[in-house]
Image: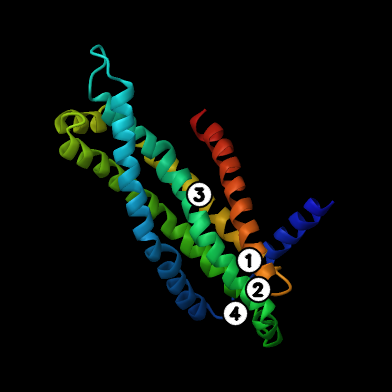
C-alpha cells in the first residue's frame, strides 16, 4: 500500500510540475541556471571517467582476443560499441544519478525543512513547477550533450592508450572505430539518455519535495533518491533496449 501511495503522490507532483507557468521569463532564467548547475558543472567527471573507461576497455579487449585468427581492429569495434550502446548512456546516467540526484534532493529537501517552499506557496507561487520544471528541461536538454561528449572522449581515451602503451596499432584502432558503423547506435543512446534524465530529476525532486524533519531526514531522502533513480534507470535500460533494438 505504501508503494501505491508514493506512486500516487509522485504523479500528483508531476501534474503540479507541468502546470502552466506564471511568468515564462523567470522560468527561462531559472532554466539557464540549472543548465550550468546540472550540465556544465558535470563536464569534468564525465570527461575523466570516459577517458579512463575507454582506455581500460581497449586494454581488456586486446587481452581477451590475443588470437592470431582475430584481426586487431576488433579492439576498436568493441570499444566503439561498448561506449555507444551502454557506457555513454546508462553508465554515465548512473554516475550523474549519484552526483546530480543527491544534489537535487538535498537542495529541495533543505528548502522544504527550512519552510522556504511553504513561503513560496503562501506567495501564490507554484513551488513544484518553479523548482522542478527548470531542472527537468535543463537535464533533458543537456544530458544528451554529456552522453555525446562521453562517446568522443571515451574513444579518444582508447586511441591515447594505443599510442602510449602500444596496445594495438593506432591505425587498426581507428579502422575498427569506422568498421561497420551504424549511426542508429547514437540515436539509440540519445533516446535512452533523455528518459534517464527525466527519471533522475523527477525521482530526486520527489524525495526532496516531500522530505520532512531535519538535516538527518534530508540526508536519508538524498540516499533514497540516488538508490531509487539508479534502479529505475536500470529498469528503463532493459525496457528501452528491448523496444528499440528488437
Q: Nearer the viewer, mark 3 or mark 2?
A: 2
Return the mark for residue 95: none
Which residue occupies the extreme bottom position in the image?
A: 123
Q: Nearer the viewer, mark 4 or mark 1?
A: 1
Callouts 1 and 2 close, C-beta under 8 Å: yes
Within 10 Å of the Cα at label 2, are there few (<14), some (14-19), or many (20+) other Cα atoms?
A: some
Cα distance between the residues tagged 3 and 2: 25 Å
What's the residue at 25%, 11% (across, down)?
69
Which residue occupies the extreme top position in the image?
A: 69
Q: Which residue is mark 3?
A: 94
Q: Is 8 displayed left or right of 188 in the figure?
A: right
Within 10 Å of the Cα at label 4, are there few (<14), some (14-19), or many (20+) other Cα atoms?
A: few
Tell me: residue 76, above or below residue 122: above
Q: Which residue is mark 1?
A: 219
Query: How does the figure colour the protein chain or chains?
Result: rainbow
- Where does the image place residue 83, in percent across and percent down from the top left? 37, 39
Cα distance between the residues tagged 1 and 2: 6 Å
Between residue 124 and residue 59, name the one nearer to us.
59
Cα distance between the residues tagged 4 and 2: 31 Å
Amino acid at each position: 500500500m505504501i508503494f501505491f501511495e508514493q506512486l500516487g503522490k509522485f504523479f500528483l507532483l508531476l501534474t503540479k510540475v507541468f502546470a502552466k507557468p506564471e511568468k515564462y521569463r523567470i522560468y527561462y532564467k531559472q532554466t539557464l541556471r540549472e543548465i550550468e548547475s546540472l550540465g556544465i558543472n558535470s563536464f569534468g567527471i564525465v570527461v575523466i571517467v570516459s577517458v579512463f573507461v575507454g582506455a581500460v576497455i581497449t586494454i581488456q579487449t586486446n587481452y581477451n582476443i590475443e588470437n592470431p585468427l582475430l584481426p586487431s581492429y576488433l579492439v576498436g569495434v568493441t570499444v566503439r560499441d561498448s561506449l555507444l550502446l551502454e557506457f555513454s548512456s546508462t553508465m554515465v546516467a548512473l554516475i550523474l544519478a549519484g552526483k546530480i540526484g543527491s544534489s537535487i534532493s538535498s537542495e529541495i529537501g533543505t528548502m522544504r525543512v527550512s519552510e522556504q517552499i511553504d513561503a513560496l506557496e503562501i506567495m501564490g507561487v507554484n513551488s513544484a513547477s518553479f523548482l522542478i520544471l527548470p531542472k527537468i528541461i535543463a537535464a533533458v536538454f543537456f544530458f544528451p550533450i554529456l552522453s555525446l561528449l562521453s562517446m568522443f572522449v571515451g574513444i579518444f581515451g582508447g586511441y591515447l592508450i594505443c599510442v602510449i602503451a602500444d596496445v594495438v596499432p593506432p591505425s587498426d584502432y581507428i579502422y575498427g572505430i569506422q568498421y561497420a558503423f551504424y549511426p542508429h547506435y547514437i540515436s539509440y543512446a540519445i533516446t535512452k539518455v533523455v528518459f534517464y534524465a527525466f527519471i533522475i530529476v523527477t525521482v530526486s525532486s520527489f524525495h526532496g519535495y516531500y522530505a520532512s524533519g531535519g538535516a538527518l531526514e534530508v540526508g536519508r531522502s538524498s540516499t533514497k533518491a540516488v538508490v531509487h533513480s539508479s534502479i529505475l534507470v536500470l529498469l528503463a535500460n532493459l525496457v528501452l533496449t528491448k523496444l528499440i533494438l528488437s
